Image (spheres, coloured by chain):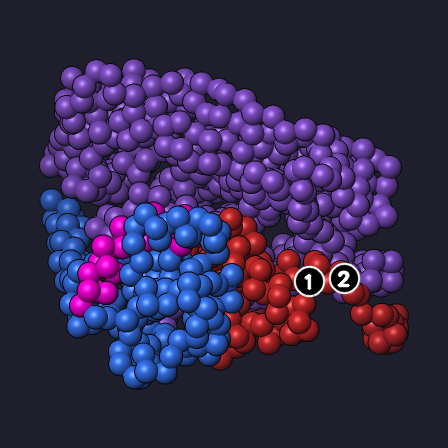
Chain colours: A red, B blue, C purple
Amino acid sequence: MILKNFYKILIILLLISPVFSYAQEQEIIDFYKTVRCLVCDGQSIYDSETLFAQNLREQIQIKYNLGFSKENIQKELLKIYGEKISFEPKKNRIILWFFPFVVLFTIILLNIKRFIRRTSN
Amino acid sequence: MNKVKVFIIPFFLILIIIFIALNLNKNDKSKIKIQYNEIPISIFEIPDFINNKTIDTELRKNPYIINFFASWCGPCLAEHPILMNLKEKGVKIIGINFRDDENNLREWLKNNGNPFEYIIIDNGDIAFELGLIGVPETYFIKKDKIFNKIQGPLFEDDIEKFL
Amino acid sequence: MLNFFGQASIYLNLLLVLSFFFLYKKKFWSSNKYILITISISGFLPFIILVVAFLKSDFTILNVLTNSYINDPIFFKFASAWGSHEGSILLWVFIINLFLLIYVIQKKYEKAVIKNILLIEIGFIIYTILSSNPFVFISSSSDIQGLGLNPVLQNFLFVIHPPILFLGYICLIIPFSLAIFILSYEDFNKKYFIEIINWSKIAWFFLTLGIVLGSYWAYSELGWGGWWFWDPVENVSLIPWLLITALIHSTNVSIKKNELKIWSLNLCLYGFISCIFGTFLVRSNLIISVHSFASDPLRGFYLLAIVAYLLFYTFYLNLKSINLFNQDRFNILSRESFLLLNNIFFISASLTVFIGTIYPLFSEIVYGQQISVGAPYYNFTFNILLAPAVLLMALAPQLSWGKNKINKLSLFKTLGLSLVLSIVILFFFKNIYFSLATFIASPIILVSVFSFQKIIKVKNINYFGQWLAHLSIAFFILSAVFTEQFDRDFNVKFDKTSDTTQIINNNLIITINNIKNYTFKNHDKIIVNLTINNSNKIMELTPSKNIYKPSGQITTEVSKSNFYFDQFYSTINSIKDDEIILNIVHKPMINFLWLSTILLILGISLSLFRKKHYE
């Protein structure tokens, strides 16, 4: 009973709680961290000091200051550099995104017999 | 001994399979699709560094080359003779000077010669739109469409393909 | 001269190991302790000779020439032995023999287990001979100084991180060999499972320590500004870690309840295979990573052959034992069924990391498209998979073996309390992720606090280790989420001529005091001295750049300043004639994160003590 009420309270609280906001500067830095530096093994453009990364950071900053949203900039990056540029794979990579849950449920299904004991004890 | 055989025979079988796979894999690299972006219009709008003229439409009718370079870049110097050669053969090259100092650029052109029909100064936005990953980078263009790009310095056989 | 001895010692070792197989039937040869000890000691020689060559800077060996510099400090010369690929494989062989020796010295050992270990060793010796011979001769003049160890590696942590990680990987060879032995002879004696759990705990200890050290190294020395990057190399060390964690929990069930036996054995098998597979991925250059120095596709394919062979044999054993599988029945609310559930989540998580790591390769071969899989993917999937596991972790130790019984009141109490806590935290910090983390982590903390008295009373060091390890996981989750959610990065640009002070906001003022140049034996150094004033707390930081001789390579050195659990962290982004750009990062609670990993390692090491209650 107590638990049920807690859920209600939680939902209400979530609805009225202000969505946390963080500084614009931090937002763009977090965005840099999702963009891969194509000329340096596996680092993001934020971590790299190569010219490629520097230029990309500058261009993104310019676009961002012009009022483009993060999503728009990301779309443009994907168009220009291909999918490799983003550390976040596209959502249409179904095998990749569904695999973990498919695996989880497969293993559970395969072992479901173990959890059900026929003899009552 | 029999047990040992059970271990060793599949081992060699797998080795053979893998070496076949290794050889097949060599051809696979060409399967990766290379992406060619559209040429940003700003190239044709920005006045040239030396003559202060915009690129004329006559040039765009024939195949031409766009080459990114900078005075601070070593490999650019390495491919420089090839570009000079191309100029003698009558190929039009548009040079895009990437994040450079104007004085250094003048000096560089004076010392090494100028293979470019036009030189456009770029602070990074043209490079961004073309998807440049480093200098030098060369784009081969026909009817305003990129049909090949070389990342890194050019070699003679790249040119032969183009011609 | 040394290169000849080195070569000879490799062949000597190969000869001795082969003779073990050819004389396997003769009891004198294959079961005699002293002969087995001789074999394992002969496996130490190649690596020892390589180390001697590095210490003496013997530049007639190509590997020494390319990986060390005559003026390097002595312990970097020592560590250079595993700075290259060839050296690290020799270290691998060395450690296999080390564990073989320890296994043989024990009172009882199985001949067949030794055979399995030596079989894997043969694979690696042949690999050394065929594709990565460290003793290649080169005629060099006497004034040559060597090309130098990769400057990124010139750090104390480099001296200990790779060997410890290798110890962790290779220690699994014994559970692996034992599992093969048990499955092929179908002798499911309890004593073997006790042996398996003891060895896997040692592996677990080293692997955890190795991963933490690697993470700390990346964070504190390489200046990448984070402690986990989901880089392929980190991923391939995480996969065995998750599998061992699952293994230890399931083996407990095998010992206590005589159930989940095939399950545990399979975890041994796949755990070790995942270690070798990880090495294969890193060394083959198939997957781009920050760690992939000195790689060569042929090597990768040879390692793939070893992996494929082991997989083949494992599949064969799986088929053989398929009838024995899935016969246990649990009560749903018993401890073993919770442990099994936990196992399932951990295995799914490890498979997720696996698919994320190889998917780019798969996509390239099948679709011809290059893609990247990074933090956003793992943060999403991995957290969803492990969050329920963490909740189960709080409850499982409270349940009893076998019985179908749960204390509903205490369950609701803990869940209710943690819900309240998470809501309070949501209002206080206004961050949904940290609030969720509180919800999943606080049951463990609450349960640990409630059961502390009981733990003290029992006076069992193993229980205490388990208690501590679980508690530290909760601390880890809290601090990791806190750090990631509330860290702040600043890119500060200074004009060298005019301004030396930058005011970021009311609470943060950064001042450059001076810039100095120093010259050392094997590198030059530029140091920037700066002061950070964070709400009147003053911190001095000295980030620097090193320019190494003889390669001219530049490394960025991090400077840190602590304030309780918070940390300010600074690197030089770029330094030019007229301007300096500094990176300044505020990482709150990061030290608590390291503390929690230390507690985890401590907890694991306490559980290493022999468990009397097994027998």
Q: Where's residue C164, x and y in %?
A: 45, 34
Region of the chain picked out in magenta, as a range: B70-89
Residue C389, quarter of the rendered image: bottom right
Same chain letter for marks 2 and 1: yes
Q: Chain of mark 1?
A: A
Q: Earlier in the sequence, mark 2 or mark 1?
A: 2
According to the image, label 1 marks what residue? A27
Q: In terms of depth relative to the viewer, which is nearer, C482 or C445? A: C482
Instruction: Residue at 71% x, 39% y: name it.
Output: C498
Amino acid at dot 1? Glu
- In which quadrant is the N terminus of chain C drawn? top left
The stretch drawn in magenta includes residue B75: yes
Where is B49 relative to C43, above or below?
below
Q: Position of residue A11 (x, y in %)?
A: 83, 75
Q: Quadrant of residue C426?
A: bottom right
Say which residue label 2 marks: A22
Q: Out of C259 and B3, give the one closest to the viewer.
A: B3
Q: At x 74% / y 53%, what residue is drawn?
A: C486
* Marks 2 and 1 close (CB-CB < 8 Å): yes
Q: Position of residue C194 (x, y in %)?
A: 47, 41
Q: Which residue is found at the position 80% from the left and 70% from the top?
A: A19
